[in-house]
Image (tube, grey):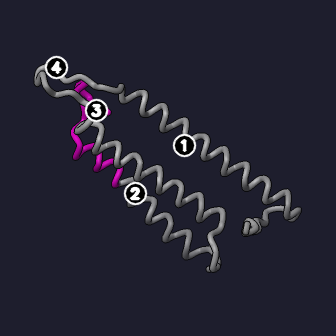
Amino acid sequence: AVEADGSSMGTADRLSVTLTLVLTAVAYKFVVASSIPQVSYLTELDKYVLVCFLFMVIAAVENVLFPAVLIDRSDPDNPTEHVRESTLILAYLALFSCANVYALYRVHVLLRLNRVPGKVVPAPVSA
C-alpha cells in the first residue's frame, strides 16, 4: 500500500484500515445475528462470515509482516522488497474470489437440493 506521494504506508496506517474493516464486520455480524432465528448449528451465512473474518485476519497479518520481514532496509535510502506487494495482493484477491465462488456454488447446491425457493437447509453432517 502506498501514500498519495508514492511512499509506502507505515504499519500503523495499514493496520488502522484493516482493523476498521474488522470492526465493521463485527458490527455487521451483531446486526445480522439479531435479525435471524437462533439455531444451534452454523448456517451457511455463519460459515461465510467466518471465512471473511479469516481473510481479514490474513490481511492484518500481512500488514504487520510485510513491512517488517519482506522489505530489505539494509540501505536506508533505497529499501527493496523481497516479494512485490502487488503479487501478494493478487494472490489474496484470487483466493478470496475462489472462496466466494465456492460459497455461491454451495448455496446454489443447497437450494437445488431443498427444492423450495429461497429456503436454505443446513448441510448434512458427515461421519
Residue type, label 1: Phe
Residue 96 — which label?
Answer: 1
Residue 84 locus on image (x, y percent): 36, 25
Disc 3 vs disc 2: Cβ atoms closer than 8 Å?
Answer: no
First to last magenta residue range: 1-19
Residue 22 — which label?
Answer: 2
Q: Residue at x 63, y 74 (%)?
A: 36
- Please give the residue where the numbered disc 4 appears in the rendered image: 78
- Please give the residue where the numbered disc 3 appears in the rendered image: 70
Q: Earlier in the sequence, mark 3 or mark 1?
A: 3
Q: CA distance from mark 2 to mark 4?
A: 33 Å
Q: CA distance from mark 1 to mark 4?
A: 32 Å
Q: Is residue 18 magenta?
A: yes
Residue 50 — which label?
Answer: none
The residue nearer to you, when weighing 1 against 65, is: 65
**Dot 2: what SS?**
helix
Residue 98 locus on image (x, y percent): 61, 41
Q: Quadrant of residue 114?
A: bottom right
Q: Residue at x 30, y 25 (%)?
A: 82
Residue 48 vertical position relative to residue 122 in the rendered view, above or below? above
Q: Quadrant of the N terminus?
A: top left
Q: Earlier in the sequence, mark 1 or mark 4?
A: 4
Q: Quadrant of residue 34?
A: bottom right
Q: Earlier in the sequence, mark 4 or mark 3?
A: 3
**Dot 4: what SS?**
loop
| Badge nearest the viewer, 3 or 2 | 3
Q: Earlier in the sequence, mark 3 or mark 2?
A: 2
Q: CA distance from mark 3 to mark 2?
A: 24 Å
